[in-house]
Image (cartoon, helix red, strand yellow):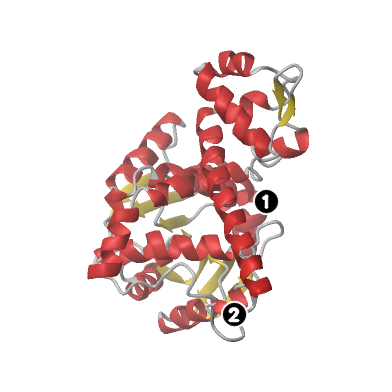
Amino acid sequence: MEAGFDFARAERFSGKLMAALDGAALGLLTSVGHRTGLFDVMRGLAPATPAEVAKRAGLVERYVREWCAALAAAGVLEHDPESGRFALPAEHAAALTRAARPGNLAVAFQWIPLLGAVEDEIVNCFERGGGVPAAAYERFHAVRAEESDQSVVAGLLERVLPLVPGLPAALERGGQMLDVGCESGRALCRMAEAFPNSRFVGIDCAPEAIASARALAREQGLANVEFRRADAADFQADDAFDWISAFASLHRQARPALVLRRIAEALRPEGSFLMQEYAGAGDVRADGGRPLATFLYALSCLQSLPVALASGGAGLGAMSGESTARRMLAQAGFGHVAVHALPRDPVHLYYVARKA
């Protein structure tokens, strides 16, 4: 051992890694529980055997039994060894079920297997450079749609839109709004439904995202919203928009600075731009104390960065921070920027920008 080796520190770090290994395993099990609906089935259910749970969920008992045992070992489920029954406490269901929206943390755990599936490609990037194309991330748009539903759509009318002074009332009167990086269109369709006097346009470069958005609009019978497949950096607006939004999409753009300039060009002089991004400080020391900092840096390292580099972009990264966002907004021509954090959302910041 090296001189001065701190055995106690080494022991503490080994314990931290073992806890992380347990946590990673729990993350995979939580993702499975969400996707199969097991948490939803067990919510409010009296203590039940794995066979009873499997029957309610329409799943295979042997797998449900092993899953229940693992979740009981992790302290997520309660277990009565005499009866062999398992139960999901109400306090745990409040963070793990669809009924808990927007507090359903199980949604975020889907990122663990999604990112793990491209590990080989990421290792190749470390060794040879380059990036990983967006198409390699299976279920990305499905997971992002659920994440957006929680972080944006659930509080869109009551908390997010009012960050722009007078916006809800103006949308009721009528106007035009563009959503950049609209993905599966949940946020825009919610606005189109709530404000029938306004017109909404969403753009995204992913064909599967646009297809999902158009299907959602048809399903809801919305005639005041349209979705176009377009690269935001190349987008040329036919007319100007009163408001433009971009929900957690700027850091995924290959050319984010150009995207912001296009947004400024498409915005009417008196218009407002509403942008949601991750609440990074752009400083590892400052970010180290933030909730979910490791998880967000992992998203940046394993998804947003390689996707941007695969497109020949600069690779802004998801955690470039507030100071970078302010600087880029100013360079794009936005002279007035207000930054907001919403209660119970430690992960995002909201920027309301107007042109100089």
Disc 2: which residue: 285
Residue 4 occupies quadrant: bottom right
Pick the residue in front: 319 or 129: 129
- Residue at the image point whose x is 36% and y is 66% from the top: 305
294 shown above or below 138? below
- Judged left or right of residue 247, residue 344 is right
Look at the image and tell me whether residue 131 can be seen.
Answer: no
- Residue at the image point whose x is 54% and y is 48% from the top: 108
Q: Amino acid at mark 2?
A: Arg
- Residue at the image point whose x is 57% and y is 39% from the top: 30
Give the percent coordinates (x, y) of residue 351: 56, 69
Q: Nearer the viewer, mark 2 or mark 1?
A: 2
- Give the mark nearer the N terminus: 2 vs 1: 1
Pick the residue in front: 97 or 7: 7
319 shown above or below 4? above
Give the CA separation, mark 2 to mark 1: 34 Å
Give the percent coordinates (x, y) of residue 250: 42, 65
Look at the image and tell me whether residue 57 can be seen.
Answer: yes
Pick the residue in front: 57 or 200: 57
Disc 1: which residue: 158
59 shown above or below 348? above
